[in-house]
Amino acid sequence: MNIHPTVQEAASIFAEAGKQVFLVGGAVRDFLQGRKPKDWDLATDARPEEVIGLFHKRNTGPAGKDRRSFVVPTGIKHGTVTVHFKGLCMEVTTFRSESGYSDGRRPDTVEFGFSIEEDLSRRDFTMNAAAYRLPRGPLVDPFGGRGDVKKRVIRCVGDPEQRFSEDGLRPLRALRFASQLEFKVDEKTLAAIPTVLSITAKVAPERARDELDKIIASAKPSNALLLMEKTGLLALLIPELAACRGVMQDRAGGFGFHRFDVLDHSLLACDFAARRGTEQHVRLAALYHDIGKPPAAQTDDAGVRTFYRHEKESSRLARELMLRFRYPNAVTDKVCRLVEEHMFHYDETWTDAAVRRFVIRAGEENLPDLYALRRADTYAQAGKEPAPQFLVPLMRRVEETLAAGRALSLKDLEVSGKDLIAAGMPAGRHMGIILNELLEAVVDDPALNTKERLLEIAGKIHERYGK
Ligand code: ATP
Ligand code: MG
């Protein structure tokens, strides 16, 4: 194993203090697969306060920005601290013994263990339960983790049902790893998931969200999402999405341009967004852009299905579910805005005013994401790559409009609230209404954007409201 020299240097500090230290978790898995680890999780018999004593404010040599190491008590209740040492960051956890999860949400208490074997036996999967003693081995692998990594199999340490019952997050972790590592889930491990759904139901929402986010961040999120569906996790955690199964979008007779039901369509869109390397909020928007379709579906007398204004319902449901998972508001807002605006239908008959209105509705800064979402949506209708020219005419029109510098927001108006007050209009609620009406007028006719004209129009609006 080719261990980072700084990690080895940190290990020698443990050794000098008479402490054991092992590389654990993802780094060992990466090594067994011949990959370079991205983070360094360590396990030690040193107590958290001893680790702090060894590394906090330790002088690490000649001047420079990384001269002093420091320790952050990231999860000290669970025995974890983060050591920042010479520019590297290592999660160091004291050996633990089995801890109870009586409420299925989080471990109740943490008891420190005495040996690495005991520590490994409380870990979730065999591939995560191997440890490499620093500095030079051996590999401690009591559950056959090495073999399972070679076979690319995710298998619980011990009895799956029991291990899942201890912590209802583990089923979701299994599927997350399946997607992230492109491993298979062992049959017995997979079969245990539907039997412990009531335990998973109790998991703290932000813990589940962290796993969902890792699924979304993987190269092909549908790998995990389909397994979630199969095991009942999707209906449990994201029932809005599960309800999209079987909702067909073509005409009753099988015409129309959609080939898939709403769930497969959503998964294809999300996979496409992932393949294009888009950011998290675009992938989430791709996944949730149509969840309003099941409640919005209507079939007319001719047997044609419509989903009138489903984007509003999708955005409402996406907000509800993201709130449930305690996403930061900024992320939720971005996702919901994209979802709500995804149904534009550009053609050359759009007037310049229509183009400007489109930009205002979507928000100029969201346009690249909105285009990316629309590409994913279009791909997912038939599983076919959109033509290279797709969206280009609209993008060109938008660029022209923006380049023409025509007013697109209040700050682009040639008058401000101050000007209106100076012209004798009262400050207060009316002011906002007047400014917005002015903006609408300018969007329709940019030639109106002069101080003189705007003051004139404002006077008329003021008169109208004054009465
Ligand atoms: P990555 O960091 O790449 O997502 P990882 O394996 O390091 O993968 P972490 O979530 O960082 O995953 O957890 C580190 C280790 O802690 C795991 O490898 C596993 O041994 C153990 N672990 C984490 N969460 C649990 C859990 N809920 N139940 C049992 N063991 C766990
Ligand atoms: Mg890790």
Image (spheres, rainbow, N blue to C red):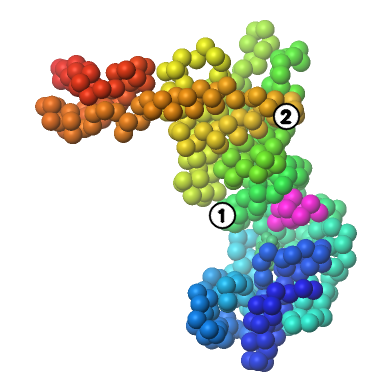
Q: Position of residue 297 (x, y in %)?
A: 61, 21
Magenta residue span: 173-183
Which of marks 1 and 2 precedes in the sequence?
A: 1
Q: Position of residue 405 (x, y in %)?
A: 38, 28
Quarter of the rendered structure image containing ligand 1? bottom right
- Does the magenta stretch mainly form a helix, a strand or a loop? helix
Residue 385 - label: 2
Q: Position of residue 282 (x, y in %)?
A: 58, 40
Instruction: Name the residue nearer the viewer: 360 or 110.
Output: 360
Q: Is residue 451 left or right of residue 382?
A: left
Residue 226 sits in quarter: top right
Secondary structure of the residue carrying tag 1 is: helix
Single out the mark in the foreground, 2 or 1.
2
Q: CA distance from mark 2 to mark 1?
A: 35 Å
Residue type for callout 2: Glu
Q: Is residue 46 above or below residue 214?
A: below
Check disc 1 and report the residue beneath it. Answer: 206
Secondary structure of the residue carrying tag 2 is: loop
Q: Is residue 317 above or below residue 96?
A: above
* Residue 41 colored in magenta in the image: no
Residue 137 sits in quarter: bottom right
Q: Residue at x 50, y 81 (%)?
A: 63
Q: Is residue 350 above or below residue 99?
A: above
Q: Residue at x 69, y 77 (%)?
A: 5
Quarter of the figure that contains the N terminus: bottom right
